[in-house]
Image (tube, rainbow, N blue to C red):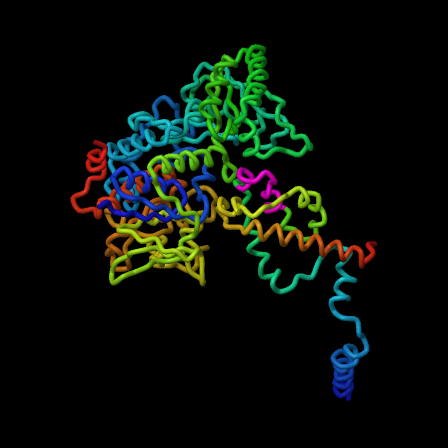
């Protein structure tokens, strides 16, 4: 008897979780994610950025790029790209980093970090953080 | 018509190969993706040493570099210098020629014992050769001196008090009498209060005005403390360090020298690479700044290197000098350790080729040998990479530097010295079209005239 009750209970829970809940709760997953993690400055990355990120984090902190670029790209590469939630802190730095199209930093980098790509990525993330901060009240 | 030699690799081995091939009359093209491990090295050129040497022995009775090289050849049968039959006179001739081509490097006879150079960790490193600004800091030659260990306020990589205590301790263990005193100068606080990077400080000290300000402060300290020597962090200019050291020596009245650097941030390493680049430019080596992608093979001959940007570099002979783990000469790809450019077989010890489980080749202690550092391609007596059967992969392909396995450059103390010498030999063989009856120095000496 108790075995039948248990199975019925399980069927009811399963049904509620798989059928009723998705139909009743119309809030998209991304919105729920942002509600949960937005205040912690965690951003959902699209699949392309997610694939890109490991390549951007290959810095070995040798500082060679600093010798060819007055904007100190090593700060961005060695520390700041390692921690996405801290991206909001580098805005000032990004404004100072005027990047032309010379690629000198990439030509000297022993670890082969695509530094220009990293800068564009950082700017996009900071912009997205801005948009998100406007949308989600902190605290 | 002269032969064309194509070299792949951005470090010391590739540069030495390029200089040797150019000296032997070849047309030389060098392709590199970026700078390699040479630019990150401490600036010391090791040829042969032994682990734990000088740990407690008096420095006066140390073995000469010749003795150490001979011991290394008996100890390490697979060392490329042993395979290529490099005795001390050949090593000495090659290093002398390189030092003449690269003025930053100070030649030192192998009959002398190695230099004892202070590092910026408060320890010492025993090394065969080094650049001029570091050579003057040879602790074994400073007996009786009173040495000011200089720190820059706001420069975190160089704690003068700790270093001064460290040097005094190791000198007393080596039975050398010298006195050290920490001193600090205030020069490099950045305008926005952030901490300066070593490379930034070096670039700042390329300017005469900054050198002058530093000299003024140091001169006052030398006078007040009665110092005979000043030991500075390795940041005295990126362009002309020897000139900066000379100027400071003249204006302060104390002998000025630099410590070695701790990789990966290394001004001396970058300087060495730049000095090699300048020498290559002087020798009219064509530099191609792009990654090499793969071989172009015709029949059983290597006839070119395909480049990432779509071009092909054709040549009569080739030198692989792509380095080990930092340079990208060896990568762990598709589950195995591979040589990505030419797909040559790679060995670690007897395990291989192309071993999969690299963790097995690391020792449990940090100190002591790690077999993983011996990973690389195997070469024959003329430095041609060999296949699984032991024959050369291609007759016109040579290898140089740390892409060659069979020796532990860390515990064996034979990093840059091996890179420079194997590079020179590989470049000479490549330029002369083979190793048949070839004695590199004899032939190269002939090319001088």
Q: Nearer the viewer, residue B67 or B345?
A: B345
Q: Is residue A67 magenta?
A: yes
Say how many tags the image has: 0
Q: Position of residue B343 (x, y in %)?
A: 36, 59
* Residue at the outermost left position: B437
Kindly identify the residue that appears in the image at 67 percent across and 45 percent down: A94
- Numbered range of the magenta stretch: A65-79
Q: Nearer the viewer, residue B443 or B54?
A: B443
Instruction: Identify the image quadrant of the C terminus of chain A.
Output: bottom right
Q: Nearer the viewer, residue B32 or A55?
A: B32
Instruction: Identify the image quadrant of the N terminus of chain A.
Output: bottom right
Residue B265 to residue B337: above or below: above
Residue B334 appears in the picture as rendered? yes
Q: Nearer the viewer, residue B188 or B32?
A: B32
The answer to which quarter of the image holds residue B139 is: top left
Q: Position of residue B236 (x, y in %)?
A: 51, 26
Q: Position of residue B131 (x, y in %)?
A: 41, 29
Q: Is residue B171 magenta?
A: no
């Amino acid at each position: 008897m108790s075995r039948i009750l248990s199975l019925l209970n399980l069927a009811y829970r399963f049904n509620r979780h798989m059928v009723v809940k998705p139909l009743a709760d119309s809030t998209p997953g991304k919105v729920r994610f942002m509600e949960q993690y937005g205040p912690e400055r965690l951003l959902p990355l699209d699949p392309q950025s997610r694939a890109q990120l490991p390549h951007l984090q290959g810095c070995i902190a040798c500082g060679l790029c600093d010798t060819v670029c007055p904007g100190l790209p090593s700060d961005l590469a060695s520390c700041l790209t390692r921690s996405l939630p801290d991206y909001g802190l580098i805005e000032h730095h990004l404004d100072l980093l005027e990047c032309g199209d010379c690629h000198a930093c990439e030509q000297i980098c022993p670890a082969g970090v695509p530094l220009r790509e990293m800068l564009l990525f950082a700017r996009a993330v900071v912009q997205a953080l801005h948009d998100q901060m406007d949308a989600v009240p902190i605290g | 018509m002269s032969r064309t030699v194509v070299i792949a690799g951005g470090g010391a081995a590739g540069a030495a190969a390029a200089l040797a091939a150019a000296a032997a009359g070849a047309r030389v093209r060098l392709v590199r993706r970026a700078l390699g491990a040479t630019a990150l090295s401490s600036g010391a050129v090791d040829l042969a040493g032994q682990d734990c040497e000088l740990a407690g022995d008096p420095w006066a009775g140390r073995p000469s570099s010749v003795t150490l090289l001979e011991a290394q050849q008996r100890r390490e049968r697979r060392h490329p210098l042993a395979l290529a039959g490099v005795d001390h006179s050949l090593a000495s001739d090659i290093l002398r020629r390189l030092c003449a081509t690269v003025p930053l490097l100070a030649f030192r006879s192998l009959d002398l014992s190695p230099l004892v150079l202070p590092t910026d960790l408060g320890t010492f490193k025993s090394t065969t050769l080094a650049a001029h600004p570091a050579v003057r800091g040879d602790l074994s030659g400073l007996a009786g001196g009173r040495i000011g260990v200089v720190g820059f306020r706001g420069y975190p990589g160089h704690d003068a008090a700790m270093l001064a205590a460290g040097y005094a301790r190791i000198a007393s263990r080596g039975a050398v009498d010298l006195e050290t005193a920490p001193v600090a100068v205030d020069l490099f606080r950045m305008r926005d209060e952030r901490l300066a990077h070593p490379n930034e400080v070096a670039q700042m000290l390329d300017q005469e005005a900054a050198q002058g300000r530093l000299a003024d402060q140091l001169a006052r300290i030398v006078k007040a403390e009665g110092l005979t020597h000043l030991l500075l962090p390795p940041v005295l200019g990126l362009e002309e360090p020897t000139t900066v050291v000379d100027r400071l020596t003249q204006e302060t009245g104390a002998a000025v020298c630099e410590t070695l650097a701790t990789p990966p941030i290394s001004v001396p390493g970058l300087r060495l690479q730049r000095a090699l680049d300048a020498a290559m430019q002087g020798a009219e080596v064509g530099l191609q700044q792009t990654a090499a992608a793969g071989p172009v093979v015709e029949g059983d001959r290597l006839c070119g290197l395909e480049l990432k940007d779509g071009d092909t570099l054709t040549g009569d002979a080739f030198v692989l000098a792509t380095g080990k783990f930092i340079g990208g000469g060896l990568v762990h790809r598709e589950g195995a350790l591979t040589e990505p450019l030419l797909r040559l077989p790679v060995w670690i010890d007897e395990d291989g080729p192309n071993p999969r489980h690299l963790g097995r080749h690391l020792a449990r202690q940090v100190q002591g040998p790690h077999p993983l550092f011996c990973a690389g391609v195997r070469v024959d007596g003329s430095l041609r990479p060999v296949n699984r059967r032991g024959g050369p992969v291609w007759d016109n392909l040579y290898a140089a530097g740390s892409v060659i396995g069979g020796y532990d450059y860390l515990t064996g103390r034979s990093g840059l010295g091996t890179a420079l010498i194997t590079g020179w030999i590989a470049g000479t063989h490549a330029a002369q079209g083979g190793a048949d009856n070839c004695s590199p120095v004899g032939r190269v000496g002939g090319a001088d005239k």
